[in-house]
Amino acid sequence: MEKQDLLYEGKSKKVYATNDPARLIVAYKDEKGAVNNHISNAVMRMLEREGVPTHLVRQLSERETVVRRVRMIPLEIIVRNVVAGKLSTLIGQPEGTRLRSPVLEYRYKAALLGNPMINRFHVFALELCTPEMLDEIDRLAFRINKILKQQLLRAGIRLIDCKLEFGCLPDGSIVLADEISPDTSRLWDAETGRKLGKDRFRRDLSNTIDAYQEILDRLERIHSVSYTHLRAHETRGNL
Ligand code: ADP
Ligand code: MG
């Protein structure tokens, strides 16, 4: 697989074209990138095993992964199991309140607008996707949430909420794309409530990387996930 032009540089990843028009290479950028790459791929493999279609093809190196090229739907799908973050002020409930049923939110991926929360009517009026596609996205999002919630709990991790992005393959089918990592989800220790994911108290970066590494270690423990390359912590010194 040959890496070609840089197509897009986002906050956390660079996206490259390849010699195969149906494939892209995603390269994670910052110091947390290698761990996020490993965690996202482990999670996507976990979901694939349960029949959820994802963009994952294979991990190429510590920071790089080959994915299926999709037409991204410019929505962030947030699935919430417990009140945290912006929902706390929105509905006036303290952080940590368990929700009776999962809550799904749509955010319009438009950085200049600050990724505002929108509803189904906005999605259709803006023609971000069709009603059929959004129904499929909802269905997949709830399924992904259910699988992740169960699997993470086996690793002693409580899934508070997570952000999902979906894309469209040339045949029109919807697949999970982008990443699922501690940067894009709230993960709390099931026993102590200690924050392991994006909302943990960040004293310094190495501290954050340690917490992310702990998530990866726990996932590996429950799944004996086989990696194509070295585990992230074995090469941490080189980051
Ligand atoms: P952003 O700052 O926009 O969130 P990221 O740093 O997360 O960007 O970079 C990843 C970019 O690649 C995102 O814009 C995301 O929508 C896009 N992307 C993720 N997976 C795929 C894919 N399989 N095909 C095409 N684009 C993708
Ligand atoms: Mg992103």
Image (spheres, rainbow, N blue to C red):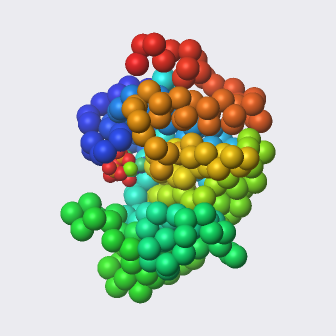
Please name the residue shown 65% across and 60% down the image: 145
Give above or below for 199 relative to 120. Answer: above
Image side of residue 232 versus residue 21, left or right: right
Query: What is the tally of numbered marks visible in this picture?
Result: 0
Q: Nearer the viewer, residue 129 or 120?
A: 120
- Residue 226, by quadrant, is top right
- Residue located 43% across and 81% down the image: 119
Point 30% across, 45% down: residue: 10
**Front-lying residue, 199 or 152:** 199
Q: Position of residue 235 (x, y in %)?
A: 50, 15
Residue 85 position in % (x across, y down): 46, 63
Q: Is residue 226 above or below residue 103?
A: above
Asked whether, in this view, residue 37 is left or right of residue 153, the answer is: left
Residue 173 vs 232, above or below: the answer is below
Nearer to us in this view, 55 or 40: 40
Q: Position of residue 231 (x, y in %)?
A: 59, 21
Quadrant containing the N terminus in the rendered view: top left
Q: Report x, y in % for residue 195.
A: 56, 46
In this rendering, position of residue 234 left or right of residue 184: right
Q: Is residue 141 visible?
A: no
Asked if 92 appears above or below 16 in the picture, the reply is: below
Which quadrant is home to the C terminus?
A: top left
Residue depicted at 64% across the width and 55% down the height? 159
Res. 220 in view: yes
Extreme residue in the left direction = 112
